[in-house]
Amino acid sequence: MLISRTNYRIMSKKVAVVTGSNKGIGYAIVRGLCKQFDGDVFLTSRKDDLGKEAIKSLNSEGLSPKFHQLDITDQASIGRLKDFLQKTYGGLDILVNNAGIAYKQDSTAPFAEQAEVTIKTNYFGTLAVCEALFPLLRPHARVVNVSSMVSTFTIKKCSEEVKSKFLNNKLSVDELTNLMNEFINAAKNGSHERKGYPSSAYGMSKIGVSVLTEIQHRLLSADPRDDIVINSCCPGYVDTDMTSHKGHKTIDQGADTPLYLALLLTGSKSPAGNFVSERKIKKWTE
Ligand SMILES: NC(=O)c1ccc[n+]([C@@H]2O[C@H](COP(=O)([O-])OP(=O)(O)OC[C@H]3O[C@@H](n4cnc5c(N)ncnc54)[C@H](OP(=O)(O)O)[C@@H]3O)[C@@H](O)[C@H]2O)c1
């Protein structure tokens, strides 16, 4: 197939995608990338109208992000973004997996529902986006999985047996997925505490994200594409809808570590496969 000169110029342009970026930390990550990244930046949102409003708001600051719909729990939506990136850019240079949900502390939703719904978005949604978009990653790509320090508090509350399963450094993605499903099933039949899991659906989902990142690092390190770096991070306690605006950091302060990781220089060896907080590597399991 012949590629016109204009198409070639667009296809060789760098491109970044931030999930769940119509508001909160994701929105600030898009703002930061628009200022610092030499390429197109995609603000994505599960709802078109919210995404487009967010684009308008950034336009009013003189920034020009692009928009694509993306619901990370919807395989067809993920597939549409993948096809679009493949056709338009032929690859992907930055992926920030930021989209996430958390039930409020005072939610009256049954724990089984909280476990299933939270893990569906935060773990399975993030995994589905990675599985679809990783084949597009170009050499020197950067991937950031937004996890949380809550994964640290939660792993400490797991029984030694459960902890050792999650922290097995030979764990595969399929085995991790089985562990996440085991937790959901235990929550559904009310046996999760007896089986050594704490009663934190969000915490368990973020253990999933932190462990997934370590596995993905192992896989990407063995990948023939050069210098693809993945890390997970905690943005800190941020003033967003998720925290009912109790967080002490602004969204731009919360975006600082994710942006630092998304913009790691070519060839940089560290952090890689780490959990990062305040731009520093933290052993999230301790
Ligand atoms: N805020 C904190 O203190 C804090 C601390 C540690 C970690 N984090 C993590 O940081 C990330 C961003 O959190 P935030 O505080 O900015 O939360 P937020 O203000 O509630 O924003 C969450 C974003 O994720 C989107 N989202 C939710 N489900 C989605 C789905 N299925 N598909 C696509 N997008 C979806 C939301 O879209 P809608 O507008 O459509 O709901 C929204 O854009 C999350 O992963 C969170 O766990 C936050």
Image (cartoon, rainbow, N blue to C red):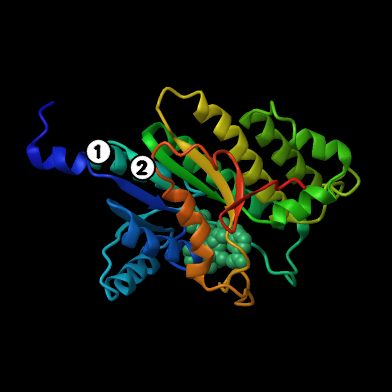
Q: Give how far across and how far down residue 111 sits, in percent.
A: 77, 58
- The mark nearer the N terminus, 1 or 2, is 1
- State the count of labels: 2
Q: Is residue 134 left or right of residue 238?
A: left
Quadrant of ligand 1: it is bottom right
On screen, residue 227 versus residue 149, left or right, reads left
Neighbour tally class for label 2: few under 14, some 14-19, many 20 plus, Cα within 10 Å = many
- Residue 101 in view: no
Q: Which residue in the protein does label 2 denote?
A: 93
What residue is at 15 percent from the left and 42 percent from the top? 9
The kind of residue on which mark 1 rests is Lys
Rendered residue at 73%/37% (across/down): 179
Quadrant of the image occupied by residue 35 = bottom left
What separation in Å lies between label 1 and label 2 (alpha carbons)? 15 Å
Could you classify mark 1 by the number of other residues whose Cα lies within 10 Å: few (under 14), some (14-19), or many (20 or more)?
few
Query: Viewed as shown, does residue 63 lie left or right of 3?
Result: right
Residue drawn at (62%, 45%) of the image: 209
Name the front one of labels 1 and 2: 2
Q: Secondary structure at mark 1?
A: helix
Q: Is mark 2 within 8 Å of ligand 1?
A: no
Q: Nearer the viewer, residue 13 or 276?
A: 276
Name the side, left or right, on which 200 lies relative to 58. right
* Residue 102 appears in the rendering: yes
Q: Position of residue 33 (x, y in %)?
A: 36, 58
**Residue corresponding to mark 1:** 87
**The label number, if any, that marks residue 9 in the structure image:** none
SS under mark 2: strand
User: Residue 93: image x %, image y %?
Assistant: 36, 42
